[in-house]
Amino acid sequence: MNIVILAAGQGKRMVSDLPKVLHPIAGKPLVGHVLDTARLLAPEKLIVVHGHGGKRVQQALSAADVQWAEQARQLGTGHALAQALPLLSDAGQTLVLYGDVPLTRLETLQQLLAAGREGLAILTVDLPDPTGYGRIVRNAAGEVTKIVEQKDASEAERAIREINTGIMAMPTARLADWLGQLKNDNAQGEYYLTDIVALAVAEGVPVRTAQPAADWEVLGVNSKVQLAELERCHQRNQAEALLVAGVRLADPARIDIRGRLQHGRDVSIDVGCVFEGEVSLGDGVEIGPYCVLKNVTVAAGTRLAAFCHCEDAVIGEQAVIGPYARLRPGAELAAEVHVGNFVEIKKSRLGRQSKANHLAYIGDAEIGERVNVGAGTITCNYDGVNKHKTIIEDDVFIGSDTQLVAPVTVGRGATLGAGTTLTKNAPPNALTVSRPRQLTLEGWQRPQKKSSDTP
Ligand code: UD1
Ligand code: CA
């Protein structure tokens, strides 16, 4: 089987310099969705017909399994498919998909291919308002005789509600002949792929139709309005799948998944959360409102309070994170760690039961178990040129407002007094403080306002 994805159209109504098929749904280009579904059918050839902004489309989607056919001028859907002809393997079926119709389900395409096993198959839907689409014309026996485009249709044909979605399966062996016979003597002066239907009928090739389970499967994107509508539709579908799988969503209309969200049992997600890339939530995980998680693994029983922002991070079991925690790439938190508000952690490991509850920056650090990082602690990991490591061993207590000037090590069981600027290693099991002794000046008085001072 061959799959050809037509993606040469410009998409003027997107009002954008980005080629239409690269506009994203759930963070992935429209045509990326089409390619992913196409791959599930394991085609022998997977071909994208590109035109407008072709270089950018090719760069964005470079993949070993995709072949490219250029359509330099957009002379119609029939002409577009003809550009792919030399790349097709001649046996079996050719499935035509559109690069701007992203949400068609695998099962629907399988049904279409089954319907077309002995000839040609068209994916159709009945629309209450069919304006703009090609109409499926049937004879008295209900057999398809042709497709007529809106602009070429008679009054009676325009009344037909069954429309051509554009998605078709056809016998590859007949394609070169049919496409060669197409003419552009129609209202738009284009080579219509849809005209092959009448050619097939004339040859006695069976023409069948299949229908998708839902209309959104065949909706295309021509404008930002439609892009936003399909985004919501896709997010609603994903949210419903999560609910069915047992995840509690405070509001299925207020969650965005731009990637893959894996989950255990009894996971609960509050409103306004965004999940990007690969996110995995263990059993009983609770995600508070307005959290953003990108490529994050959260182990069982952990709770994220509101407004956490986590990227490329791993969080252990029974941890308590946030509100307002920021975990940057390379943050690795062991079980039962607590990370509180306005704490930023980058490329650092925190051992079991360690806590950094308020206002801290921890970068390039290795922190042991049961460590308490006081409010306002900063690892000074950057000397302006290079990054250096801070090592804090088990059972350390770091007083508030401490600066650890890396590279530096705090020995096991050590205590750092509040306000310490640590520039040398702190020995284990001892109190290290760096600050001037506290002075109280006897007889000092506050300045008094002079009465003659008034301006
Ligand atoms: C097409 C169908 C119409 C169907 C409708 C569904 C034809 C003649 N008409 O109409 O029956 O109801 O889709 O949306 O096929 N493209 C190219 N090169 C071209 C022209 C189009 O690659 O020269 C691509 C576009 O990028 C798009 C797809 O083909 O992905 C459909 O093109 P579009 O112009 O939207 O087709 P319609 O005129 O809407
Ligand atoms: Ca269209």
Image (spheres, helix red, strand yellow):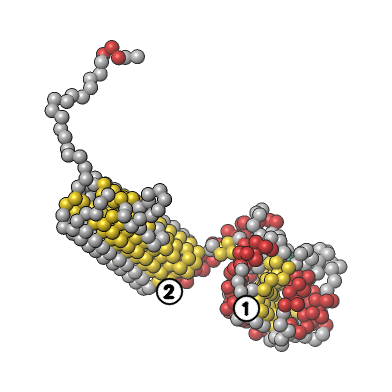
Q: Which mark is residue 342?
A: none
For this rendering, which residue is in front, 151 or 427? 427
Crowd band around label 1 with a 10 angstrom C-alpha radius: few (<14), some (14–19), many (20+) = many
Which residue is located at x 35 percent, y 53 percent? 381
Label 1 is placed on what type of residue?
A: Leu
Classify residue 366 by image quadrant: bottom left
Image location (x, y in percent) of residue 318? 29, 66
Quadrant containing the C terminus is: top left
Which of disc 2 and disc 1 is earlier in sequence?
1
Classify residue 214 by image quadrant: bottom right
Q: Left or right of 35: which side holds 268?
A: left
Mark 1–mark 2 distance (CA, rounded to whole Å): 25 Å
Under circle 1, the secondary element is helix
Camera sees residue 147: no
Q: Left or right of 400: which side holds 25?
A: right
Furthest residue toward right: 185
Which residue is located at x 28 percent, y 67 percent? 335
Q: Which residue is mark 2?
A: 245
Above or below, 129 against 384 in this view is below
Q: Which mark is residue 109?
A: 1
